[in-house]
Image (cartoon, grey):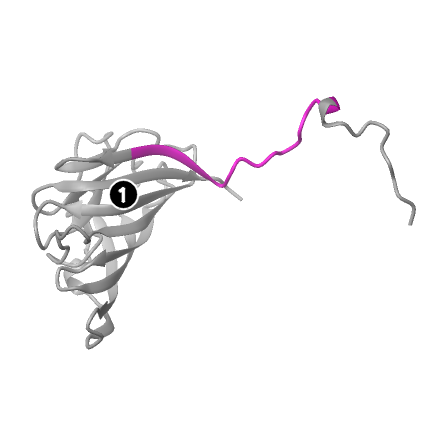
Amino acid sequence: MALVKYNNNSISAVTALDSVPSGDMVLLNTNTITSGVSSSSFTSNIDSTYNTYVFKFINIHPSSEGNRFRFQGSTDGGSTYGVNITSSFFKAFHNEADNSSGVSYDANNDLANSTSYQQINLDDDLGTDNDQGLSGTLYLFSPSSTTFVKHFFGTSNFYHRSDFSVQCFYGGFFNTTSAIDAIDFEMATNNIDSGIIKMYGLRES
């Protein structure tokens, strides 16, 4: 096979590059919490630009012992939160002493067409020690659709106040055909003490 050699192979002669990838996930907003806040909301950039939005929460730390991290959606730009949600929730857990573990459905944290906030971790179990906290991911699909409900699912892992590693799995839908245009994260009681929440748009393949 003959070797093909181009006479002009200098990078300085290139005038255009075709389809240079810029990444599948586009960072849209970052909420960095360094002191106690009652909630952390995303009220812009949730629109028809992307079909899938991804939220990543990193080292979320509560201000009070035995807390619950949770979220809700809005159809009015964040003026109110309380869209009807139907969801399911299960968990896997294992403690540091290696004498308790399991996987189970958790009916306390699912919702049945409820306007309550969807739990991200178990009831009243997130600890406040300096080395305790929660991290995870939430996916939201086609939030700007005015035809279909808005599906979501997510996972989290948190440090239980009784020294367990607990992984939570939750999924469901916002039962509305109105566009979801804002998402709010909060603790069930008191404040989010610290943490980072990032919102990405996921490019279509």
Q: Residue furthest bottom?
A: 99
Q: Nearer the viewer, residue 10 or 107?
A: 10
- In the depicted structure, whether residue 128 falls above or below residue 78: below
Evaluate whether residue 161 shows in this view.
yes
Please give the range of residues in magenta: 13-30
Is 26 in the magenta? yes
Name the residue at 17% across, 59% down.
122
Evaluate whether residue 46 shows in this view.
no
Which secondary structure, mark 1? Answer: loop
Name the residue at 13% across, 58% down.
125
Question: What percent of the width, then of the height, locates residue 201?
Answer: 41, 38
Direction from residue 122 to residue 148 in the image, left or right: right
Direction from residue 46 to residue 194 in the image, left or right: left
Instruction: Kindly identify the amino acid type of the residue bearing the numbered disc 1.
Output: Thr
Q: Nearer the viewer, residue 21 or 44?
A: 21
| Circle 1 residues within 10 Å: few <14, some 14–19, many ≥20 | some
Quadrant of the rendered image containing residue 158: bottom left
Name the residue at 10% across, 45% down.
63
Is 189 in the magenta? no
Q: Nearer the viewer, residue 105 or 196?
A: 196
Name the residue at 22% across, 68% down.
105
Quadrant of the rendered image containing residue 17: top right
Question: What percent of the width, then of the height, locates residue 38?
Answer: 12, 37
For the image, the number of numbered tags is 1
Question: What percent of the width, then of the height, locates residue 94?
Answer: 23, 70
Residue highlighted by disc 1: 176
What main secondary structure does the magenta stretch of the protein show?
Answer: loop
Question: What percent of the width, then of the height, locates residue 185?
Answer: 21, 41
Q: Residue furthest right?
A: 2
